[in-house]
Amino acid sequence: DTGVSQDPRHKITKRGQNVTFRCDPISEHNRLYWYRQTLGQGPEFLTYFQNEAQLEKSRLLSDRFSAERPKGSFSTLEIQRTEQGDSAMYLCASSPGVGSHQYFGAGTRLSVL
Amino acid sequence: GNSVTQMEGPVTLSEEAFLTINCTYTATGYPSLFWYVQYPGEGLQLLLKATKADDKGSNKGFEATYRKETTSFHLEKGSVQVSDSAVYFCALSDKDNFNKFYFGSGTKLNVKP
Protein backbone atom coordinates (compact mmCIF):
# COMPACT_ATOMS: atom_id res chain seq x y z
CA ASP A 1 0.00 0.00 0.00
CA THR A 2 1.88 3.01 -1.28
CA GLY A 3 -0.95 5.48 -0.88
CA VAL A 4 -2.65 7.68 -3.46
CA SER A 5 -0.13 9.31 -5.76
CA GLN A 6 -0.69 12.50 -7.75
CA ASP A 7 1.47 14.02 -10.45
CA PRO A 8 2.63 16.71 -10.84
CA ARG A 9 2.63 18.26 -7.37
CA HIS A 10 2.75 21.74 -8.81
CA LYS A 11 1.79 23.12 -12.21
CA ILE A 12 2.16 26.69 -13.40
CA THR A 13 0.56 27.52 -16.70
CA LYS A 14 -0.52 30.49 -18.75
CA ARG A 15 -4.16 31.33 -19.25
CA GLY A 16 -5.56 29.51 -22.25
CA GLN A 17 -3.23 26.51 -22.07
CA ASN A 18 -4.38 22.95 -21.47
CA VAL A 19 -3.20 20.96 -18.45
CA THR A 20 -3.52 17.33 -17.43
CA PHE A 21 -3.12 15.82 -13.99
CA ARG A 22 -2.69 12.17 -13.10
CA CYS A 23 -3.86 10.20 -10.09
CA ASP A 24 -2.77 6.68 -9.16
CA PRO A 25 -5.12 5.30 -6.51
CA ILE A 26 -4.31 2.62 -4.00
CA SER A 27 -4.25 -0.63 -5.93
CA GLU A 28 -7.55 -2.51 -5.98
CA HIS A 29 -9.53 0.51 -4.82
CA ASN A 30 -12.44 0.53 -7.23
CA ARG A 31 -13.72 3.98 -6.26
CA LEU A 32 -11.91 7.15 -7.29
CA TYR A 33 -12.87 10.76 -6.59
CA TRP A 34 -11.61 14.17 -7.69
CA TYR A 35 -12.02 17.28 -5.52
CA ARG A 36 -10.99 20.91 -5.86
CA GLN A 37 -9.78 22.93 -2.89
CA THR A 38 -9.35 26.69 -2.97
CA LEU A 39 -7.48 28.70 -0.36
CA GLY A 40 -9.22 28.72 2.99
CA GLN A 41 -11.93 26.30 1.90
CA GLY A 42 -12.60 22.62 2.24
CA PRO A 43 -12.43 20.28 -0.72
CA GLU A 44 -15.39 20.36 -3.12
CA PHE A 45 -16.49 17.30 -5.03
CA LEU A 46 -15.85 17.28 -8.79
CA THR A 47 -16.41 13.75 -10.06
CA TYR A 48 -16.54 10.07 -9.13
CA PHE A 49 -15.53 6.83 -10.85
CA GLN A 50 -16.46 3.31 -9.98
CA ASN A 51 -13.94 1.21 -11.84
CA GLU A 52 -13.79 2.78 -15.30
CA ALA A 53 -17.30 4.26 -15.24
CA GLN A 54 -17.74 7.95 -14.45
CA LEU A 55 -20.94 7.90 -12.43
CA GLU A 56 -21.25 11.44 -11.14
CA LYS A 57 -20.11 14.90 -12.17
CA SER A 58 -20.53 18.10 -10.20
CA ARG A 59 -21.90 21.25 -11.73
CA LEU A 60 -18.47 22.69 -10.87
CA LEU A 61 -17.08 20.56 -13.69
CA SER A 62 -17.61 22.80 -16.70
CA ASP A 63 -17.26 21.66 -20.30
CA ARG A 64 -13.58 22.59 -20.16
CA PHE A 65 -12.96 19.83 -17.64
CA SER A 66 -12.79 16.16 -18.51
CA ALA A 67 -11.79 13.17 -16.45
CA GLU A 68 -11.04 9.61 -17.46
CA ARG A 69 -10.18 6.33 -15.83
CA PRO A 70 -9.59 4.14 -18.88
CA LYS A 71 -8.81 0.79 -17.31
CA GLY A 72 -10.20 1.33 -13.86
CA SER A 73 -6.76 2.03 -12.44
CA PHE A 74 -5.17 5.48 -12.79
CA SER A 75 -7.21 8.55 -13.66
CA THR A 76 -6.51 11.79 -15.48
CA LEU A 77 -8.13 15.19 -15.10
CA GLU A 78 -7.73 17.59 -18.02
CA ILE A 79 -8.55 21.26 -18.04
CA GLN A 80 -8.75 22.92 -21.42
CA ARG A 81 -8.29 26.66 -22.03
CA THR A 82 -7.36 27.31 -18.43
CA GLU A 83 -8.65 30.42 -16.68
CA GLN A 84 -7.29 32.20 -13.64
CA GLY A 85 -10.30 30.97 -11.67
CA ASP A 86 -9.08 27.41 -12.18
CA SER A 87 -6.16 28.09 -9.83
CA ALA A 88 -6.65 25.68 -6.93
CA MET A 89 -5.46 22.46 -5.37
CA TYR A 90 -6.84 19.41 -7.16
CA LEU A 91 -7.18 16.41 -4.88
CA CYS A 92 -7.67 12.78 -5.75
CA ALA A 93 -9.01 10.17 -3.35
CA SER A 94 -9.71 6.46 -3.56
CA SER A 95 -11.77 4.02 -1.57
CA PRO A 96 -12.23 0.26 -1.57
CA GLY A 97 -16.00 0.53 -1.41
CA VAL A 98 -19.09 1.08 0.66
CA GLY A 99 -18.50 1.81 4.32
CA SER A 100 -14.88 2.86 3.94
CA HIS A 101 -13.42 6.31 4.23
CA GLN A 102 -11.53 7.95 1.41
CA TYR A 103 -7.75 8.00 1.14
CA PHE A 104 -6.39 11.26 -0.23
CA GLY A 105 -3.35 12.10 -2.29
CA ALA A 106 -1.21 15.15 -1.59
CA GLY A 107 -2.81 17.03 -4.47
CA THR A 108 -1.72 18.98 -7.53
CA ARG A 109 -1.50 22.70 -7.03
CA LEU A 110 -2.40 24.59 -10.22
CA SER A 111 -1.49 28.21 -10.73
CA VAL A 112 -2.86 29.93 -13.84
CA LEU A 113 -1.06 33.15 -14.70
CA GLY B 1 -29.15 18.94 1.03
CA ASN B 2 -25.93 17.97 2.74
CA SER B 3 -23.54 20.49 4.27
CA VAL B 4 -21.01 20.89 7.06
CA THR B 5 -20.31 23.99 9.11
CA GLN B 6 -17.28 24.27 11.34
CA MET B 7 -15.90 27.04 13.47
CA GLU B 8 -13.63 29.50 11.79
CA GLY B 9 -10.00 29.73 12.73
CA PRO B 10 -7.33 30.19 13.36
CA VAL B 11 -7.42 28.73 16.83
CA THR B 12 -4.31 29.50 18.85
CA LEU B 13 -3.59 27.53 22.02
CA SER B 14 -0.71 26.97 24.35
CA GLU B 15 0.72 23.48 24.68
CA GLU B 16 -1.29 21.24 27.02
CA ALA B 17 -4.44 23.34 26.63
CA PHE B 18 -7.86 21.80 25.98
CA LEU B 19 -9.09 21.87 22.40
CA THR B 20 -12.62 22.00 21.01
CA ILE B 21 -13.41 22.55 17.35
CA ASN B 22 -17.12 22.76 16.68
CA CYS B 23 -18.75 21.02 13.74
CA THR B 24 -22.43 20.83 12.83
CA TYR B 25 -23.99 19.20 9.82
CA THR B 26 -27.12 19.07 7.72
CA ALA B 27 -27.95 15.81 6.03
CA THR B 28 -30.88 14.25 4.23
CA GLY B 29 -30.11 10.71 5.37
CA TYR B 30 -27.92 9.04 7.95
CA PRO B 31 -24.38 10.03 7.08
CA SER B 32 -21.06 8.85 8.43
CA LEU B 33 -19.01 11.63 10.00
CA PHE B 34 -15.27 12.20 9.82
CA TRP B 35 -12.47 14.43 10.96
CA TYR B 36 -9.53 14.78 8.60
CA VAL B 37 -6.25 16.57 9.35
CA GLN B 38 -3.99 18.30 6.85
CA TYR B 39 -0.41 19.05 7.74
CA PRO B 40 1.49 21.62 5.63
CA GLY B 41 2.41 20.23 2.23
CA GLU B 42 0.60 16.96 2.82
CA GLY B 43 -2.70 15.37 1.83
CA LEU B 44 -5.72 14.97 4.04
CA GLN B 45 -5.37 12.16 6.56
CA LEU B 46 -8.23 10.49 8.35
CA LEU B 47 -8.12 11.37 12.04
CA LEU B 48 -11.28 9.62 13.26
CA LYS B 49 -14.75 8.63 12.18
CA ALA B 50 -18.18 7.63 13.46
CA THR B 51 -20.74 5.80 11.39
CA LYS B 52 -23.92 6.08 13.45
CA ALA B 53 -25.57 8.11 16.18
CA ASP B 54 -23.88 8.05 19.60
CA ASP B 55 -20.72 6.47 18.21
CA LYS B 56 -17.51 7.98 19.52
CA GLY B 57 -14.50 8.13 17.23
CA SER B 58 -11.07 8.44 18.80
CA ASN B 59 -7.45 8.51 17.70
CA LYS B 60 -4.18 10.02 18.99
CA GLY B 61 -5.97 11.57 21.98
CA PHE B 62 -8.65 13.21 19.81
CA GLU B 63 -12.30 12.34 20.29
CA ALA B 64 -15.62 13.22 18.66
CA THR B 65 -19.13 11.92 19.37
CA TYR B 66 -21.84 11.65 16.70
CA ARG B 67 -24.79 13.58 18.17
CA LYS B 68 -27.87 13.16 16.03
CA GLU B 69 -30.10 15.28 18.28
CA THR B 70 -27.85 18.31 17.91
CA THR B 71 -26.47 17.33 14.47
CA SER B 72 -22.97 17.86 15.80
CA PHE B 73 -19.58 16.14 15.73
CA HIS B 74 -17.29 18.36 17.79
CA LEU B 75 -13.59 17.51 17.95
CA GLU B 76 -11.89 17.53 21.36
CA LYS B 77 -8.48 16.84 22.81
CA GLY B 78 -7.55 17.17 26.43
CA SER B 79 -3.96 18.33 26.01
CA VAL B 80 -2.68 19.60 22.68
CA GLN B 81 0.92 19.44 21.52
CA VAL B 82 2.88 21.63 19.14
CA SER B 83 2.82 18.73 16.68
CA ASP B 84 -0.99 18.99 16.52
CA SER B 85 -0.68 22.27 14.61
CA ALA B 86 -2.52 21.67 11.34
CA VAL B 87 -5.80 22.32 9.54
CA TYR B 88 -8.72 20.17 10.67
CA PHE B 89 -11.66 19.37 8.40
CA CYS B 90 -15.01 17.99 9.44
CA ALA B 91 -16.78 15.95 6.77
CA LEU B 92 -19.80 13.80 6.15
CA SER B 93 -20.32 11.06 3.62
CA ASP B 94 -23.60 10.44 1.89
CA LYS B 95 -23.94 6.68 2.11
CA ASP B 96 -26.86 6.73 -0.30
CA ASN B 97 -24.84 8.57 -2.94
CA PHE B 98 -21.61 6.60 -3.47
CA ASN B 99 -20.14 7.92 -0.21
CA LYS B 100 -19.78 11.40 -1.69
CA PHE B 101 -17.98 13.61 0.82
CA TYR B 102 -19.01 17.07 1.95
CA PHE B 103 -16.34 19.06 3.82
CA GLY B 104 -16.40 22.00 6.15
CA SER B 105 -14.14 24.95 5.38
CA GLY B 106 -11.43 23.82 7.79
CA THR B 107 -10.09 25.16 11.07
CA LYS B 108 -6.44 26.01 11.41
CA LEU B 109 -4.94 25.13 14.78
CA ASN B 110 -1.75 26.78 16.00
CA VAL B 111 -0.23 25.36 19.18
CA LYS B 112 2.49 27.43 20.82
CA PRO B 113 5.15 25.98 23.13
Image (cartoon, rainbow, N blue to C red):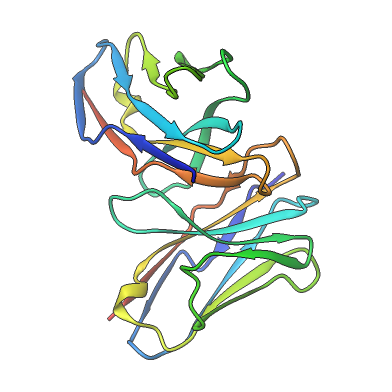
Residue B25 falls in which quadrant of the image? top left
Q: Is residue A103 above or below residue B49?
A: below
**Foreground of the two, B32 or B46:** B32
Q: Residue B21 vs residue B64: left or right?
A: left
Residue B23 visible in image: yes
Q: Is residue B88 above or below residue A4?
A: above
- Measured as percent of width and height from the top left, residue B37 is found at 43, 35
Q: Residue B61 vs residue A2: left or right?
A: left
- Measured as percent of width and height from the top left, residue A62 is found at 48, 77
- Measured as percent of width and height from the top left, residue A56 is found at 64, 63
Q: What residue sits 58% from the left and 15% below the top?
A: B55
**Foreground of the two, B30 or B39:** B30
Residue B17 falls in which quadrant of the image? top left
Q: What residue sits 44% from the left and 43% below the top?
A: B103
Q: What residue sits 48% from the left and 37% below the top?
A: B91
Q: How many marks?
A: 0
- Measured as percent of width and height from the top left, residue B70 is found at 42, 19
Q: What residue sits 39% from the left and 48% below the top?
A: A42
Q: Quadrant of the N terminus of chain A?
A: top right
